[in-house]
Image (tube, rainbow, N blue to C red):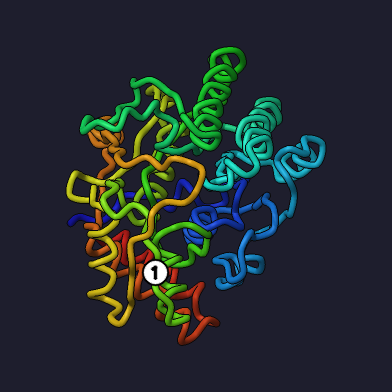
Amino acid sequence: MENLVINPNFWRNQNVFLTGHTGFKGGWLAIWLTYLGANVYGYSLNPPTDPNFFSQTNLKDKINKSIIGNITDKSFLSKSMNDSKPTIIIHMAAQSLVSKSFIEPLETYMTNVIGTANVIDVAKDIKSVKAILNVTSDKCYENLETLKPYSEKDRLGGKDPYSSSKACAELVALAYKESFLNNSNIKLASVRAGNVIGGGDWAENRLIPDFFRANKSNKTLNIRSPNSIRPWQHVLEPLSGYLLLCEKMVETSDNFSESWNFGPDQLGEKTVLWVVNQLIKLVPNTRWKFIKNQKKFKEANLLKLDITKAKSKLGWKPRWSIEKALDMTVKWYQMSNENVDTMYEYSLEQIKSYQLG
């Protein structure tokens, strides 16, 4: 496969204000941006888990500035963003767990909807800003659980607080774009990604972290929905799309200020059980059992994304197979058990490997 064409000359010395940098996806993007030569100013709450990718990679000392703050605190957000003099804003901070949204629905809406409005509202008045990337989720669609993949033109919705909050965040971004940004020099796009996997995700009630926790503690992995189909992809897949999209928004006169799906090819759409069996091939001696979902919320059994637009208009496409993505994920966790002091360098090596295909 040909090398991934991300232009380091574009990113060199770009001031990037990145919300959610202490999270799993945000942490990986912070490393990639730093490698490309960008000045990264992170804004986020403290990492929600221990261990966490942010601490394991010592990211605090690698980026230009790590700001601990809440996106619902508009005053502090405004001061932090203005002080950073950003050219590009990538908004990834979120309450990102479906299960938690049932326990704390109002916090989920405050963070994912009002927080998004705060980020865009502050950004629209900063003269240095050229592009805003709003990161939502594939769960923003009204999921009818059919075999038809969802395209960017399909209806937004959500039957749980998390999914509907992401649909709301999409509507907030669209309203701000149409009301304030169409006649400005600021471009705004929203991106929707599938189920991301990769080293350093330690969230609760997620398959990959649950697998490695069970393996390390010699416990049995509990599987609630073995036949559910998800669009699995390595975290670097959508992140590469985000980087390409930001470049296009800033450097071309074409209209890239739209909504975009970033997901796997059809071969990456696998059941939970398939992924577990593949993991056991790579990490033997891990036991699992099926348990009935005793939780009071319904989990979707089927979700697929149509990535035709990103392929044809942006020139983006998935680079790693699901097998490769799982192999790289397993290697990251295994390395973190052996030598945690090298995880920044090891993560960077995986990024370099991804760029080479």
- Local packing at callout 1 (Cα closer than 10 Å; few below 14, some 14-19, many 20+) is many
Q: Name the spot of residue 227 as percent of width and height, x first.
A: 26, 50
Quarter of the rendering occupied by the N terminus: bottom left
Q: Is residue 71 left or right of residue 313?
A: right
On the image, the x and y values in percent for residue 60 come to: 66, 65
Q: Residue 247 versus residue 141: which sits nearer the camera?
A: 141
Observer able to see residue 15: no
Query: Where residue 37 sits: x, y (%)?
Result: 52, 57
Q: Could you tell whether 72 is left or right of 20 in the image? A: right
Question: Can you say which quadrant of the picture contains the C terminus?
Answer: bottom left
Q: Nearer the viewer, residue 209 or 71?
A: 209
- Left or right relative to 42: residue 228: left
Residue drawn at x 62%, y 30% as measured from the top left: 113
Q: Which residue is mark 1?
A: 221
Quarter of the image holding residue 111? top right
At a point 57% along the width and 67% down the height, the residue shown is: 52
Residue at (74% x, 54% y) in the render: 68
Q: Nearer the viewer, residue 308 or 150?
A: 150
What amino acid type is highlighted by mark number 1?
A: Leu
Find the residue positioned furthest to the bottom: 338
Q: Please report the residue visible at 37 percent of the width from the left and 40 percent of the height from the top.
A: 300
The picture places residue 186, in percent across and down from the top left corner, at: 56, 26
